[in-house]
Image (cartoon, helix red, strand yellow):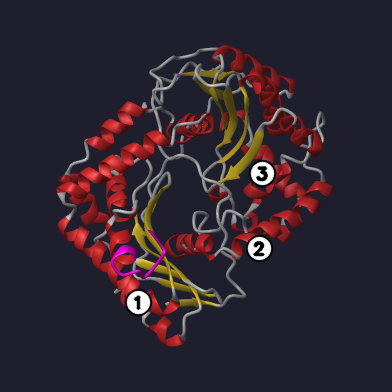
């Protein structure tokens, strides 16, 4: 077991999250205006795609029944693209792109969107970054102009780098004050070690303080080429009009000059996580102990992810789930308990989170381990399976009820899978999961020896017993 003193570990968390599902349609010819219509990706509208000269992809979903639109640009760069000394550069750069261009100051960027009642933000994850604005449909041209200007014309001035350094350090400090978030980053480190996927998205105080303007600017030029970008928009819009406005904005910046450029495809690869039986403890004077017990999961391209999603829903996806019932309802040992999956291009994680009083840690861990072992051996009952399929199906549809969610859906689908999957197809895949599918994936995933990450004020005696949970 590794016991981490509170002065050395600096766990952080991703700035935001995006939908994990995807859709499918044919790829249009690069270097030409070529739009390919397909069935509505969410049942709400029509998805079309164009690949512009320079390799820039534009994907839209038209939903005429709403009065809003969300416009976003996805970059195929995340914290896993950083070297150890660049850790945190992707997120730092995300902040800097809001600091001004030749056409707009930082105040202009925010004020123009605020003036129309819009919302603008960004998030950085381990494998991608997204910048977006949500506005009234009539203000979509403004959102396109502002976001495209930010992505193509950022000045990244030395004075802005220094000013924003303090903001990023405060964000790191803020996340360190939330052990419920920190423990997930600690779990990534426990499972993936000192690798790009195992390091925190925000970086550490040491790496952020060491980053220079020149290094960040080089990172920007290398990873924000149009071939690495996907433009996504959803709402009451016209595809051809969006394409024209995006093309004008990028051509104004001189970003579409390479007519032979091809879009960079989704990440590929194969990675096995071999960690088993590892325990990491971060000593913090918190009121609760925050824990993640888990093991290697599945990559986001593995077709068994549908069965794993159903399994996770049954184990810890709602108030009727096994873990919620056993830990909270029957015994009152915790307020928050849930299971989750994280899928990357080449690997994945499965985890169970619980927050409880320190003196209850071992009772809670034993219950969680017993439930995981039981499902690994016996699978799910028919009623559990039916309930989990219904829950996952319903949450999938309800998660697509606004233009921001639709933009996330089609943008991430193009960037991470290079295809689109309609909501009907997604529901069909969930409904097709059988007891044998769940039993097989449960045996493979839950049958592995788990690892454990804990943040809390455990005594030496309590710490010494943590190895029992992963034996």
Q: Where 97 falls versus 180 (above or below)?
A: above
Kindly state the secondary structure of the residue where label 1 is placed.
helix
Residue sitting at 54 percent across and 58 percent down?
A: 199
For disc 2, the neighbor class at 10 Å (few under 14, some 14 to 19, many from 20) is some
Residue 50 visible at all: yes
Q: Nearer the viewer, residue 307 or 279?
A: 307
- Find out whether residue 38 is within the magenta segment: no
Please tell me whether mark 3 sits on a helix, a strand or a loop: helix
Quadrant holding the C terminus: bottom left
Name which quarter of the figure residue 84 lies in: bottom right
Instruction: Name which residue lies at 53% across and 50% down.
Output: 80
Work out whether 337 lies above or below 109. below
Identify the residue under disc 3: 94
Q: Mark 2, mark 1: which one is toward the viewer?
A: 1
Q: Which residue is mark 2?
A: 173
Q: Position of residue 390 (x, y in %)?
A: 27, 40
Q: Magenta segment: does it hold 334?
A: yes
Residue 298, given in percent of the width and then of the height, sits at: 34, 49
Q: Which residues are magenta?
A: 328-337
**Residue 421 figure quarter:** top left
N-term-proximal mark, 2 vs 1: 2
Q: Nearer the viewer, mark 2 or mark 3?
A: 2
Q: Which secondary structure class fits the magenta region best?
A: loop
Task: Pick the residue in front: 186 or 455.
Answer: 455
Which image quarter holds the N terminus? Answer: bottom left
Q: Name the residue: 61% across, 22% down.
A: 54
Extreme-right residue of the structure:
159
Question: What mark, if any, has residue 362 been given in the picture?
Answer: 1
**Which label sits in the foreground, 3 or 1?**
1
């Amino acid at each position: 077991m590794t016991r981490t003193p509170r002065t050395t570990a600096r766990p952080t968390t991703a700035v935001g999250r995006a939908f994990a599902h995807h859709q499918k349609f044919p790829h249009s010819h690069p270097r030409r205006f070529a739009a390919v219509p397909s069935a509505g990706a969410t049942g709400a509208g029509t998805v079309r795609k164009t690949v512009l000269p320079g390799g820039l992809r534009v994907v839209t979903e038209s939903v005429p029944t709403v009065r809003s639109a969300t416009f976003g640009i996805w970059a195929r760069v995340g914290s896993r693209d950083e070297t150890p000394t660049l850790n945190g550069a992707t997120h730092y750069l995300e902040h800097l792109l809001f600091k001004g261009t030749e056409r707009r100051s930082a105040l202009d960027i925010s004020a123009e969107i605020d003036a129309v009642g819009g919302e603008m933000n960004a998030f950085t994850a381990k494998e991608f970054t997204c910048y977006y604005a949500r506005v009234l449909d009539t203000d979509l041209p403004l959102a396109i102009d502002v976001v495209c200007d930010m992505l193509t014309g950022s000045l990244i001035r030395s004075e802005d780098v220094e000013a924003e350094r303090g903001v990023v350090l405060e964000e790191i400090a803020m996340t360190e004050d939330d052990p419920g978030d920190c423990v997930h980053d600690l779990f990534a480190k426990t499972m993936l070690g000192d690798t790009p996927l195992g390091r925190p998205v925000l970086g550490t105080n040491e790496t952020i303080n060491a980053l220079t303007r020149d290094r960040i600017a080089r990172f920007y030029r290398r990873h924000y080429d149009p071939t690495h970008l996907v433009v996504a928009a959803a709402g009451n819009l016209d595809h051809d009009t969006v394409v024209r406005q995006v093309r004008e904005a990028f051509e104004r910046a001189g970003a579409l000059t390479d007519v032979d450029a091809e879009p960079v495809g989704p990440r590929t690869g194969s990675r096995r996580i071999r960690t088993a039986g590892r325990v990491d403890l971060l000593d913090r004077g918190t009121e609760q102990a925050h824990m993640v017990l888990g093991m290697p999961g599945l990559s986001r391209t593995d077709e068994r992810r549908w069965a794993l999603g159903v399994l996770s829903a049954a184990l810890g996806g709602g108030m009727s789930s096994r873990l919620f019932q056993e830990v909270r309802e029957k015994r009152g040992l915790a307020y928050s308990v849930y299971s989750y999956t994280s899928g990357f291009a080449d690997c994945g994680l499965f985890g169970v989170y619980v927050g409880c009083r320190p003196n209850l840690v071992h009772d809670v861990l034993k219950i969680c381990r017993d439930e995981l072992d039981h499902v690994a051996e016996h699978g799910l009952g028919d009623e559990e399976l039916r309930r989990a399929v219904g829950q996952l199906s319903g949450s999938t549809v309800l998660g697509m009820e606004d233009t921001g969610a639709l933009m996330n859906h089609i943008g991430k689908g193009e960037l991470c899978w290079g295809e689109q999957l309609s909501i009907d197809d997604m529901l069909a895949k969930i409904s097709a999961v059988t007891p044998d599918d769940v039993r097989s994936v449960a045996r493979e995933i839950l049958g592995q020896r788990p690892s454990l990450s804990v943040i809390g004020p455990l005594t030496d005696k309590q710490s010494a017993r943590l190895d029992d949970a992963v034996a």
